[in-house]
Amino acid sequence: MPVVEMRDVRKEYAGVDALAGLDLRVEQGEIVAMLGPNGAGKTTTFELLLGLVRPTGGTVEVLGRRPGGGVRARVGAMLQSAGLPEQVTVRELVRLVGRSYPRALDADDVLERTALSQRAARTVTTLSGGERQRLLLAMALVGAPELLLLDEPTAAMDVVSRRAFWEQARASVEEGATILFATHDLAEASAVADRILVIAGGRLVADTTADALTHHGDDDLEEVFLALTAETSSAFDKGDD
């Protein structure tokens, strides 16, 4: 049974299709990268998987069930839109989030795993951008999730922090988690993902490995990505004439 499955999913906002028949599948234990230009539908996809919005059409399943409700406690998420209360401490916030889950991990253990032990007694307002990203990861991990949905998870991190982040993410996979992450960093996707999904115009235009996408390194990944998304955008533009 796939951890994530979306079949012919459409989502419309005020007459505009954010998703226009999206099909994707993520298997247990995979690390899957989702690439796409701004407006491709990546954020909408995450919102649907978390049960924050409902599809206009099609089928969405997470861990074999409809998103939200009982399955929500089995999913951890890092979202770009997530706000953080500024005057609570790092430890207090992670513990508070953990109380929402039936089998939460020890907060101090999670802080150690995300290199935040030295910041545990500090308030959120004192954290750097990279530390805030690690705090968001800690909040996503404390519930011992089976699925991690990560939206641009390393955007504010330096090279060292980024490497540590993915080491922790891989450790979570070894413990049974599955990861679907959105990124604009093609090199990062190539380095850490088992599979790459390319989305454009609200549809899946490629589902493959980085190696296959570049014809075993013969083609530049960025050029391939631009060609895929440009061709899809052109096709949609012509269809609207």
Image (cartoon, rainbow, N blue to C red):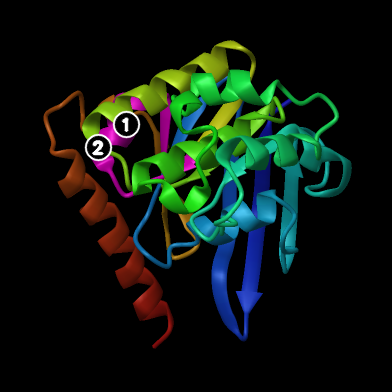
Magenta highlight range: 181-196
Residue 31: image location, x then y, percent:
48, 27
Mark 1 residue crowding within 10 angstroms, few (<14) / some (14–19) / many (20+):
some
Check residue 162 in the rendering and tell me which mark sits there, or answer none: 1
Q: Is residue 206 magenta?
A: no
Give the residue displayed 44% in from the left and 43% down from the top: 133
Between residue 41 and residue 231, name the one nearer to us.
41
Give the residue displayed 70% in from the left and 50% down from the top: 50
Residue under pointer 2: 158
- Which residue is the extreme one toward the front? 121
**Viewed as shown, does residue 160 lie left or right of 100?**
left
Measure how far apart labels 1 and 2 are at the Cα level. 6 Å
Give the residue displayed 61% in from the left and 38% down from the top: 139
Q: Is residue 182 magenta?
A: yes
Q: Secondary structure at mark 2?
A: loop
Between residue 152 and residue 94, name the one nearer to us.
94
Between residue 136 and residue 188, name the one nearer to us.
136
Residue 156: image location, x then y, percent:
32, 47
Q: Does the rendering let one see residue 219?
A: yes
